[in-house]
Amino acid sequence: MAQLEVRNLHAGYSRDIDILRGLDVTARESMLTTIIGANGVGKSTLLKTIIGQLRPHTGTIRFGERDMRDVNTRDLVNLGIAYVPQKHAIFPEMTVQENVEMATWAFRHEKPRARSAVERVFERAPYLREFRSKRAGLMSGGQQRLMQLELALMSDPELLLIDEPTVGLDPKRAGQIYDHLRRLVTEERRTILMVDQNVIAGTDVADYIYVLELGANKLEGTKKKFDEEYRDAISEWLF
Ligand SMILES: Nc1ncnc2c1ncn2[C@@H]1O[C@H](COP(=O)(O)OP(=O)(O)OP(=O)(O)O)[C@@H](O)[C@H]1O
């Protein structure tokens, strides 16, 4: 087991402009850490930098003993990390079975592993069976998000990096996603680092919370500390 440590991170989309300005974030083992902050504060940029889509300008990113600064996105599976992007990463015109098979790309050279990974998805998520030969786009938005999570879990990651998992979902379906994330932490002992716009529910489900402002740390604390000291003030800061 390992934790993710981001220290004094400066990063952005061009060399001379820092979107992230000295960020410190830790995703503690077997905990759900939520990062919140206003639009454009740099939440997605942080995840993109962790997974190697952007190179840090300065600072460090470590996952256990591994220095992540030179990581390639395709190395993530072998490091035990999965990334769930904000935009839907499923193909609505393809069947659920085809979507699941596509997601075995990372183990395309290991046919038995790929086959058993496909079956494991349908064991873990029985509701997917009835859609197996139907177009994935026929599922509800919530089911599509749950499927996206299951596809990310195919490689049995220790660390999940999740970008706004409930965007566009009604509160009931969002609640189902958050319940699922909680189970991944408490029952399966996975570590989750999630960025979220859903300030209330996204922090309610967390063990540890960071609030960002202009690409830097504003506040952080356990959920207990957050509830006791900051929750009442949070809407004022963010909106
Ligand atoms: N591909 C890009 N090229 C240049 N600038 C970008 C790019 N993507 C985002 N930015 C800028 O980086 C800043 C941070 O964006 P980011 O998407 O990380 O914010 P965020 O906190 O995730 O906000 P949101 O919740 O709206 O997605 C914003 O000013 C945004 O305009």
Image: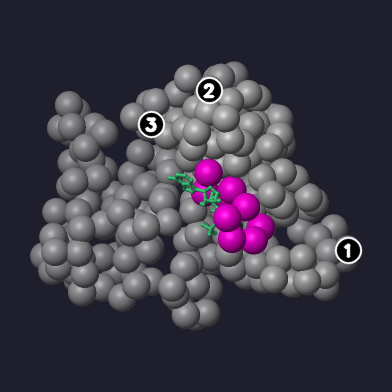
Helix, strand or loop for disc 2: loop
Query: Which region of the structure is painted magenta?
Result: 37-45
Name the side, left or right, on which 83 lies relative to 216. left
Q: Quadrant of the C terminus?
A: bottom right
Q: Is residue 38 magenta?
A: yes
The first of marks 1 and 2 along the sequence is 2
Q: Is residue 35 placed above or below 56 in the rendered structure?
A: below
Measured as percent of width and height from the top left, residue 80 is found at 45, 32
On the image, numbered disc 3 is attached to which residue? 73
**Residue depicted at 88% across the width and 63% down the height:** 229
Please state if 114 lies on the left or on the right of 188 as rendered: left
Task: Check whether the beta carbons of the residues at disc 2 and disc 3 lie within 8 A of each other.
Answer: no
- Check mark 1 vs ligand 1: CB closer than 8 Å? yes or no: no
Which residue position holds label 2?
69
Of callouts 1 and 3, which one flags the residue occurring earlier in the amino acid sequence?
A: 3
**The N terminus, quarter of image:** top right
Residue under the image location 58 percent in, 55 percent down: 40
Mark 1 burial class by Cα count in 10 Å: few <14, some 14-19, many 20+:
few
Q: For residue 26, which quarter of the picture?
A: top right
CA distance separating discs 1 and 3: 38 Å
Under circle 3, the secondary element is: helix
Q: Amino acid at mark 3?
A: Thr
* Residue at 63%, 39% in the rendered image: 20
**Within-10-Å neighbours for mark 2: few <14, some 14–19, many 20+:** some
Question: Is residue 217 in view from this perspective?
Answer: yes
Q: Is residue 172 magenta-colored?
A: no
Q: Main secondary structure of the magenta part?
A: loop
Residue 79 in the image: x percent, y percent? 45, 27
- Name the amino acid type tagged 2: Arg
- Single out the mark in the foreground, 1 or 2: 2
Q: Residue furthest front?
A: 16
Instruction: Please name the residue shown 65% across and 31% down the image.
Output: 9
